[in-house]
Amino acid sequence: MNKTLRQAVIAGNWKMNNTRVETKALVEELIPLVKDADCGVVVCVPFTNLETAVALTKGTNIKVGAQNCHFEKSGAFTGEISAAMLVEMGVEYVVLGHSERRQYFGETDVTVNKRLLAALEAGLKPILCVGEMLEDRENGITEELVALQTKIALKGVSKEALKNVIIAYEPVWAIGTGKTATAEQANEVCAVIRGVIAKLYDSDAANAMTIQYGGSMNAKNAEELVAQPDVDGGLIGGASLKAPDFKAIIDAASK
Ligand code: PGA
């Protein structure tokens, strides 16, 4: 697969970290550090910090993402945020189907698909997360499971709309655990996902698809991971909260 056909993207998933004051400090620290990046740079911040992050990054190469959105346009969904509300704020990306949402907040492949369709319709670029639990890997069903998650999440997505989707392969056992998948394991599953895209759409769509790896990616292991032929950058949790570490990962993806 030809890596030059697609852009590597390094996205920080801040999760439930940083107040507005801390957001301002971290984004201001990042702006000069990553200005020469030769890859896409995104920070996915808590809802309450989106406005701050969008204002600070205006005119820079840093894009802003949210960490979820609801599938309905409006209505009686206490605590939820619609895709249009994010777009109105100047948000470009949205993480969907993160394993923490699936594990702790009851999200399923079906609700992830609904959120993805709503996000695309509103003009957001979803970062769709898929990945297996340790038990699934031990049972030898990683490939089938990730393929299934991908297929269900993309149901109803046209080839044109797919251009706005990024997929992040995140083995659940590697998230926040310090246990990274080996570069071979990461590449293997990213290649499976690319194969699924080729079957669902065609090889052009598969070649153009940005497929990230996520799960304990850090300043030290990023270079080997992002150098893999089917790995197009990363979705970074812990290491995205420290500007020098996030910069080191961006530098690795810019090579
Ligand atoms: P981690 O998180 O880098 O802290 O493992 C990745 C993620 O959850 O997206």
Image (tube, grey):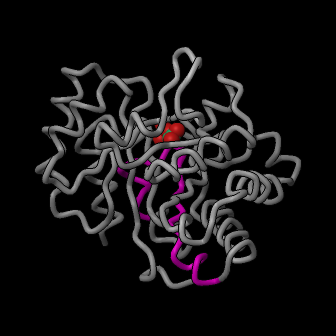
Residue at x 60%, y 41% (from the top left corner): 115
Position of 191 compared to 29: left or right?
right
Q: Is residue 152 above or below residue 36?
A: above
Provide residue 197's location: percent of width, then percent of height. 67, 70
Decide which of 159, 219 is in the foreground and name it: 159
Decide which of 127, 188 is in the foreground and name it: 127
Residue interval drawn in magenta = 203-224
Decide which of 156, 128 is in the foreground and name it: 156
Provide residue 27's location: percent of width, then percent of height. 20, 38
Residue at x 36%, y 49% (from the top left corner): 92
Provide residue 54's location: percent of width, then percent of height. 23, 40
Q: In the image, is residue 104 part of the stretch drawn in magenta?
A: no
Residue at x 38%, y 27% (from the top left corner): 47
Q: In the image, is residue 205 part of the stretch drawn in magenta?
A: yes
Residue at x 17%, y 29% (from the top left corner): 24
Q: Is residue 99 above or below residue 9?
A: above
